[in-house]
Image (cartoon, helix red, strand yellow):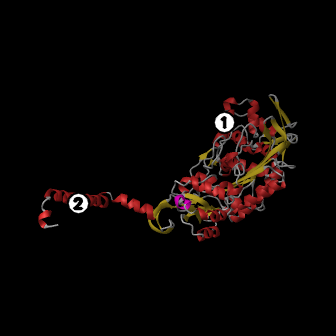
Amino acid sequence: MSRHAKSRYPVRNAIVLLFFLSGLVLLAARAVYLQVFNSDFLQGQGNQRHSRLVKDNSHRGMILDRHGSPLAVSTPVDSVWAHPPTLAGERGKWARLAALLDISPREFAQLVRKHEDREFMYLKRHATPALAERVMALKIPGVALQREYRRYYPLGSVAGHVIGFTNIDDQGQEGVELAYDASLRAVPGTKRLLRDLQGNAVEVAESVVLPKPGRDLVLSIDRRIQYLAYRELKAAVIEHGARAGSAVVLDASTGEVLALVNEPDFNPNNRAGLRNGVFRNRAVTDLFEPGSTIKPFTVAVALESGKYSPGSVIDTTPGTLRVGDRTFRDVHNYGVLTVAGVIGKSSNVGMSKIALALDKKNMWEMLRHAGFGQSTGVQLPGEVAGLLNPYSKWVPVDQASISFGYGISVTPLQLARAYLALANDGMALPLTLQHVETVPEGERIMSVKTARQLQSMLELAVSDAGTGRAAQVADYRVAGKTGTVRKLMPDGYSEDKYVAWFAGFAPIHSPRLVMVITVDEPAGAYYGGEVAAPVFGHVMTGALRLLDIPPDAPRKETRILTVKSDRVTE
């Protein structure tokens, strides 16, 4: 075409040139918009194709005993996960992967289809190292490992009830794990993984949000005493064919829980074996009438009233007492006893006579201040408050029954808290599961004089002439009280099912340990002195030596004060 011909269409040429220039301007504007003003969009599209945000887990806080020994730790494990859209395109490799994961091909196909529109799904949580290695050796696009943590409990069943356990997502489910879950739990972060052309994660590009590990928790538990209590309680439950049992050991000077065990036990390391009921913490969830173990608190009211002294005489003849429509009985006709003798011989008749001479409001207030009818505050899941009816509802038969432990319900931990006040010269302390360095502020519930008089009476109860002689500890002075109660069933009190108790402390000169033993439905022998007292003696013997507590001199033989022919004799 000649130069003259080209100039014949100037308008058309201008339009075409303007069109191309406009296109270039639009493209440039679009590029500027995407690169400058909307760069996040392009970055997101690139990230979707070449990287992925995943959870970055951290470990749960450790649980330690008072000496720093681990009671619960988190160990790293790998979980197998997949990117469903990518895995869906590798159908030919499903069979080998399903076989490794012990999943049927049909279930595996359903699993992939169910999550096909998602970005993440677990194939196997907490895989063994060998399994994780074999899965990754298949080199299936879209399948990768994620670091998680699994809880491990070094003491196993020895501390299962008090420590509890976590679920597969590392969330507390029972015991201390649940009670302190908020502080123990880790806060996961996020990290960006780079992917290859097959969709497999090949390296960590960056940490987007750093994970935060959980805080460690130091408990008051002493793993050595915990093991002692576990061993002796388990042996007693087996020996006596009992339904269950509990043992609680407290530090008499601080209110710290040194040991808490239950039978039957469970191993928190074996999640497959966990069943409802097996991990019930009976020491805080099960209520029993305390029987004669509550008698020292009735006597405390009597001594505080000024009406009685340890040597005051009570005539229990003929071993029975009619109150209202009920007849209370002693095992034997003990005749005339002192108040101390009523404790030593565990006379229900003598205790009822003392109680009926007291103001019922004062009795109720003593029991209330001792902690009955209230939770202990240790924050263990499922703890119940117990039963202590208002004194306004008491009639004489109630007042007499409660004086020797019927008509009131307590947990083993509540009874241990009450005996802590007796051991601590009448000062009730709050209980704690966390290790403390300083003694907490307490509440005085009786005078020092009354508490020490009760300590002497409870020493008589553990003498050769008392009901708790099986609780004796060589070279140490021990104070304690047995209890034996018929179990309350839906149709009344059972004739052949009992709860055996022993509650006490040692050494008397400066009490260091308070202990309560409960054995539920022992077969054959069922008295507290025969079933529960020996457990107390064995555990206390070992614990006093473990703590290197010096002996407070061999016990001297004592006899229960009795009255014959108007003359007091020993």
86 in magenta:
yes
Task: Tell me where residue 463 appears, x and y as whole percent.
Answer: 81, 53
How many neighbours does mark 2 have within 10 angstroms: few (below 14), some (14-19), or many (20 or more)? few
Task: Tell me where residue 568 appears, x and y as whole percent.
Answer: 83, 44
**Residue name at image x 56 percent, y 64 percent:** 143
State which quadrant residue 3 falls in.
bottom left
User: Which of these two is toward me, 98 or 217?
Assistant: 98
Tag 2 residue: 20
Q: Tell us which disc is closer to us: 2 or 1.
A: 2
**Residue name at image x 17 percent, y 57 percent:** 12
State which quadrant residue 130 falls in.
bottom right
Q: Are marks 2 and 1 in contact (CB under 8 Å)?
A: no
Amino acid type assigned to the residue bearing label 1 in the image: Asn
Left or right placement of residue 478 versus residue 417 in this view: right
User: Which of these two is toward me, 165 or 239?
Assistant: 165
The secondary element bearing badge 1 is classed as helix
User: Which of these two is toward me, 50 or 444?
Assistant: 50
Task: Tell me where residue 405 appears, x and y as whole percent.
Answer: 75, 40
How many neighbours does mark 1 have within 10 angstroms: few (below 14), some (14-19), or many (20 or more)? some
Tag 1 residue: 362
User: Which of these two is toward me, 468 or 225?
Assistant: 225
Amino acid type assigned to the residue bearing label 2 in the image: Phe
**Residue name at image x 20 percent, y 58 percent:** 16
Q: Which residues are magenta?
A: 84-88
The secondary element bearing badge 2 is classed as helix
Left or right placement of residue 122 versus residue 462 in this view: left
Task: Tell me where residue 234 appears, x and y as whole percent.
Answer: 77, 57
Our reading of the magenta stretch's main secondary structure is: helix
Mark number displayed over residue 439: none
Judge whether 544 appears above or below 349 on screen: below
The mark that comes first in sequence, 2 or 1, is: 2
